[in-house]
Amino acid sequence: MHIAIGCDHRGLNLKQAIIELLSQMGHSYEDFGCYNSAAVDYPDIGSRVALAVAEGRFDHGILICSTGVGMSMVANKVPRVRAALCHDTFSARRSREHNDANVLCLGESVTGQGLAEEIVTAYLSAEFQGGRHAQRLEKIRELERQKALTEIARSVAHDLNNSLSIILGQAQLAVEETDDPKIKRAFQAIEQGALNASRTVQHLQRVARGESSPKGEDH
């Protein structure tokens, strides 16, 4: 297997030991850092490894920090990543067999080298069992899809609201400057339509943020 591995300055020693283990097991790997004891921010390393796994460039990722908690939090923010923080071999095997984990997180300060090596071995030796577990994972993927759609909706609503603001401003300006009644009515209709659309977009933005509409606002 091809493994992406990374750590912060608190996981450097354990990372080196795991790299040696990977070589002994016959796995190829890429070291994403860090490479010395200088302090680094774990989200930088964790996100790079997680993205590399999510993009399919690696079969699995291994992330190490002091406790493993920070790295697992970062990795699980990346869509299609299922990071498991493991302190024992049973959890490591189950994370693969039942949860199809693709990133293993370890804590150098809480897991000794010998146990960590056993955990990595158990993790990489296990296989996803599918079946009922696949159905449960599909529910996780559905949550990811819903989140992605919400983010897209927010972006589209933001751009649409900006465009409507320009249309509304130009229509208002045209109403003020024209003396022709027919043209004035036409621009007033455009102004009202843009205003109504803008209110609807703002309502959708509040819904996407999980907020309720102001009292008395009807949609």
Image: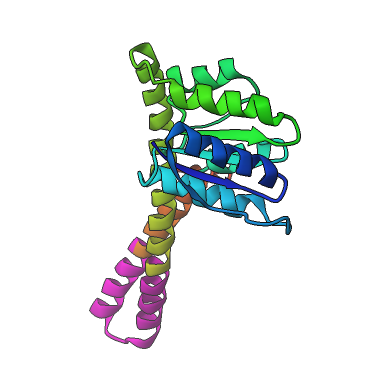
Q: Residue at x 38, y 36 (%)?
A: 1
Q: Position of residue 60 (x, y in %)?
A: 44, 37
Q: Is residue 70 above or below residue 138?
A: below
The span picked out in magenta is 164-193
Of all residues shown, which one is farthest toward the left?
Answer: 182
Q: Residue at x 47, y 28 (%)?
A: 101
Q: Residue at x 36, y 72 (%)?
A: 167
Q: Position of residue 62 (x, y in %)?
A: 54, 38
Q: Is residue 112 left or right of residue 218?
A: right
Foreground residue among 192 and 14: 14
Of all residues shown, which one is farthest toward the front?
Answer: 24
Foreground residue among 78 and 49: 49
Q: Do we see residue 101 in this rendering?
A: yes
Q: Position of residue 33 (x, y in %)?
A: 58, 54
Q: Is residue 51 left or right of residue 192?
A: right
Q: Is residue 90 above or below residue 163?
A: above
Q: Which image quadrant for residue 140?
A: top left
Q: Position of residue 124 (x, y in %)?
A: 46, 27
The C terminus sits in image quarter:
top left
Of all residues shown, which one is farthest toward the top?
Answer: 132
Q: Which image quadrant for residue 84?
A: top right
Q: Do we see residue 217 in this rendering?
A: no
Q: Is residue 166 magenta?
A: yes
Q: Is residue 148 above or below residue 67?
A: below
Q: How is the image coloured?
A: rainbow
Q: Residue at x 58, y 24 (%)?
A: 119
Q: Is residue 36 magenta?
A: no
Foreground residue among 211 and 81: 81
- Magenta span: predominant SS is helix
Of all residues shown, which one is farthest toward the right?
Answer: 109
Q: How many marks?
A: 0
